[in-house]
Image (spheres, grey):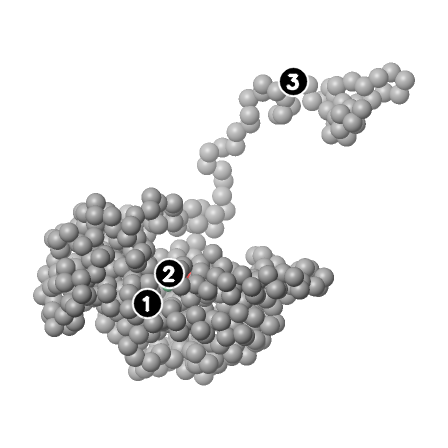
């Protein structure tokens, strides 16, 4: 009986009073769900919006680290915190407590900008640790800083607008702005970070990593920071400051945020918990200038109506109860020890063949090959010894030179001698060191970046890194 009712309800059958139940005629031969019928196929390349097409284009050749890879004993993926350091028990307790306490109200949709308790905890944390000038109302909680960048692009960038990126840069940021249809202009980076004097006259936005340039690790000195802010004012540009890993500074005291120096409200400060806690948490925040607050909240509500309330509540308590601060201070010490071992190993096994940059902070260091080499060969060799290393751009394709823009241009990597005095003498041999380099690689692929005009013009040899040197923090030991 139930089966008949179901067929009638779905229109596969029709019933006539006093007569019986009949198969519906309209469904007869060409009904898509009819058994044995050929499934209807959508065209393999459906018509996409311009954004959709640009998003597909930006994902072409995504670095393989986004895919599942066979585990190797030494995986030098950058930017991942060591999961063993994470205080699992404390997190579990806080999460369970928040779940038990969940009120009726907390199960409902929340406000798009995020839970008030978390915004308050973040405002306090960011102003204390990073000198960010903000209160809870300036904070918008996002699903990782990647969403923060995407919201910035949605709210501020129209197709054709000029967006400035550092060169080299974080490919995830470039993908966002390219997908938004921006005309991306790259400005070269040297040992002091972005060459501010070379910024274009006008731009809509500049994406910068002043506290730990990604990926070279350079710290933008105060005069350049001030010049950058002055440029933004002159050019009418917004500055998106990506402060992705500056909790970890090893040698010197933390540098203050660019946002803290901003007196006119041109800086959007983006922070994340991916590097201090764990990336699948997908919690980050944007400290938004007052003038953009409404637009950010509206855009956030359009994209996902807000971030998961349970994790937000748990993170707020985790911060408030001091777990985050304790975890950062403990893992900073451990990362420093790992980093020391790594630098010793690089020094011992690569010596003058590599120059390390950005070793004072963050979760990675970069090594610049002193000679023209092939990245693929070096990586294959390392892999043969059970180690995975990355090219500086993650993997080559994201720094590719799209043929239609700048065919085949390459940066030249100087045959520079590296002063070995800059590296500490090796004390102990680290077990990962042998896996890192069987022998210093002769040919590591040139770092390709031909699409960038800035880079073409100036290819500073000191900032043309070619191999990821692994972060101590990521090193499986
Ligand atoms: C420089 C930089 N910014 C942003 C991100 C994205 O972080 P999230 O996990 O918060 O989206 C990454 C990720 O590795 C990164 O390296």
The local crowd at label 1, few if under 14, some if 14 to 19, many if 20 or more residues have their Cα within 10 Å, is: many
Q: Is disc 1 in contact with disc 2, using a CB cutoff of under 8 Å? A: yes
The residues bearing labels 1 and 2 have C-alpha atoms spaced at a distance of: 9 Å
Q: Is disc 3 in contact with disc 1, using a CB cutoff of under 8 Å? A: no
On the image, numbered disc 3 is attached to which residue?
29
Establish if 222 lies above or below 97: below
Query: Where residue 299 appears, x then y in whole percent?
Result: 56, 62
Residue at 43% over, 49% down: 54
From the viewer's perspective, tell me whether residue 185 is left or right of residue 155.
left
Queried on whether the Cβ of the residue with tag 2 lies below 8 angstroms from ligand 1, the answer reads no
**Closer to the N terminus: mark 3 or mark 2?**
3
Query: Could you tell me which secondary element the residue under label 2 belongs to?
Result: loop
Residue at 54% over, 74% down: 321
From the viewer's perspective, tell me whether residue 406 is left or right of residue 124.
left
Tag shown at residue 335 = 1
Tag shown at residue 108 = none
On the image, numbered disc 2 is attached to which residue?
82
Is residue 401 visible in the rendered image? The answer is no
């Amino acid at each position: 009986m139930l089966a008949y009712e179901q067929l009638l309800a779905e229109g596969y059958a029709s019933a006539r009073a006093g007569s019986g139940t009949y198969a519906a005629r309209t469904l007869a031969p060409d009904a898509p769900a009819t058994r044995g019928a050929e499934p209807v196929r959508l065209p393999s390349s459906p018509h996409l919006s311009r954004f959709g097409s640009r998003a597909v284009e930006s994902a072409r050749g995504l670095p393989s680290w986004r895919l599942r890879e066979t585990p190797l004993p030494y995986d030098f993926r950058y930017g991942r915190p060591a999961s063993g350091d994470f205080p699992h028990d404390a997190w579990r307790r806080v999460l369970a407590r928040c779940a038990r306490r969940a009120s009726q109200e907390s199960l409902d949709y929340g406000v798009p900008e995020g839970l008030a308790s978390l915004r308050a905890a973040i405002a306090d944390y960011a102003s204390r640790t990073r000198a960010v000038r903000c209160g809870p109302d300036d904070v918008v909680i996002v699903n990782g800083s990647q969403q923060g960048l995407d919201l910035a692009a949605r709210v501020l960038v129209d197709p054709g607008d000029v967006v400035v990126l550092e060169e080299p840069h974080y490919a995830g940021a470039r993908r966002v702005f390219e997908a938004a249809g921006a005309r991306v202009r790259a400005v070269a980076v040297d040992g002091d970070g972005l060459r501010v004097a070379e910024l274009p006259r006008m731009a809509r936005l500049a994406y910068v990593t002043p506290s730990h340039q990604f990926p070279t690790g350079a710290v933008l000195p105060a005069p350049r920071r001030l010049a950058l802010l002055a440029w933004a004012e002159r050019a009418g540009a917004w500055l998106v400051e990506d402060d992705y890993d500056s909790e970890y500074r090893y040698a010197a005291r933390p540098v203050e945020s660019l946002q803290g120096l901003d007196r006119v409200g041109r800086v959007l400060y983006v922070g994340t918990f991916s590097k201090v806690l764990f990336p699948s948490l997908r919690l980050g925040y944007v400290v938004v200038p007052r003038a953009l607050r409404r637009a950010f909240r509206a855009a956030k509500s359009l994209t996902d109506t807000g971030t998961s309330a349970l994790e937000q509540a748990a993170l707020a308590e985790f911060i408030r109860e001091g777990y985050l601060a304790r975890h950062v201070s403990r893992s900073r010490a451990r990362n420093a020890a790992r980093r020391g071992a790594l630098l010793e190993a690089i020094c011992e096994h690569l010596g003058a063949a590599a120059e390390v940059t950005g070793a004072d902070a963050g979760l990675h260091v970069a090594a610049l090959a002193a000679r023209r080499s092939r990245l693929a060969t070096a990586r294959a060799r390392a892999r043969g010894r059970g180690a995975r290393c990355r090219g500086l751009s993650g993997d080559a394709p994201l720094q590719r030179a799209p043929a239609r823009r700048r065919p085949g241009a390459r940066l030249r990597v100087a045959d520079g001698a590296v002063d070995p005095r800059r590296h500490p003498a090796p004390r102990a041999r680290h077990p990962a060191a042998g896996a890192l380099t069987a022998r210093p690689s002769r040919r590591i692929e040139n770092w390709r970046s031909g699409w960038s005009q800035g880079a073409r013009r100036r290819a500073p040899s000191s900032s043309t890194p070619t191999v990821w040197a692994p972060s101590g923090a990521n090193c499986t030991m």
